[in-house]
Image: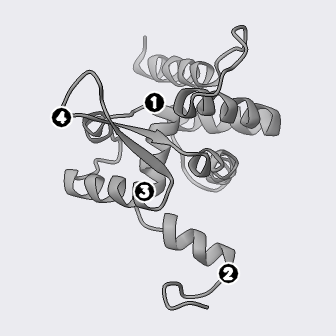
Amino acid sequence: MDALHRSGCPINLTLEILGDRWSLIVIRDIMFGNRRHFRELLQKSQEGIASNILADRLKRLVERGLLTREDDPTHKQKAVYSLTEMAIDLVPLFAHMGSWGRKHLPVSEELSIRAELLEEGGQELWEDFMDELRAKHLGKVLPPDKPSVLDRLTEAYLEVADRRKGG
């Protein structure tokens, strides 16, 4: 094994990239929250990520090939972050992690509804969501009549959150 990695084990190598406290959270927020700018990721973080940590993770995720960073054409000082195919391939991992968390941990209803829908929808829903992410982040063209998985997940979250607020 080369000196850059502890071992060639695929789980170890994955954890070397994604095993810190924030990387998967940043990817989750881009993937499921459609947050593409630094300020959105910072201000809408339910976990309260610090700005220096967010900047470091974004830089690291770009360097590792999970995100791309492009200048925002609408604002000279903003950047738009996009998922790469490598990050989009994490959808099944997120689905499995959400399912495991729902089974074993004291999750909140509103923050676990998306995991529940991904679990119920299974591989077919994951593939549809991955295609939608490819369209949004990589420019792939989708059929115009294809329903949005992200919209479905977001509507379910908002519905549960509204109900829990008494709305």
Question: Which residue is located at x 48 percent, y 54 percent?
Answer: 24
Mark 2 and mark 1 lie on one chain; the one further toward the N terminus is 2
Pointers 2 and 4 in contact (C-beta within 8 Å): no
**Dot 4 crowding, Cα within 10 Å, few <14, some 14–19, many 20+:** few
Question: Which residue is located at x 49 percent, y 44 percent?
Answer: 28
Residue 23: x and y in percent read: 43, 57
Structure colour scheme:
one colour
In front: label 1 or label 4: 4
Residue 50: x and y in percent read: 23, 53
Tell me the distance, in whole angstroms, between the alpha carbons under discs 2 and 4: 40 Å
Residue 165, picture quadrant: top left
Depth check: give the residue in front, 70 or 87.
Answer: 70
Task: Identify the element where label 1 is drawn.
Answer: loop
- What residue would you read off at disc 2? 9
Q: Is residue 110 left or right of residue 130?
A: left
Task: Identify the element where label 4 is drawn.
Answer: loop
Q: Amino acid at mark 1?
A: Asn
- What residue would you read off at disc 3? 61
Mark 3 and mark 2 lie on one chain; the one further toward the N terminus is 2
Mark 2 and mark 4 lie on one chain; the one further toward the N terminus is 2
Q: Amino acid at mark 2?
A: Cys
Direction top: furthest residue: 145
- What residue would you read off at disc 4? 77
Question: Where 9 sits versus 101, above or below?
Answer: below
Tell me the distance, in whole angstroms, between the alpha carbons under discs 1 and 4: 20 Å
Tell me the distance, in whole angstroms, between the alpha carbons under discs 3 and 4: 20 Å
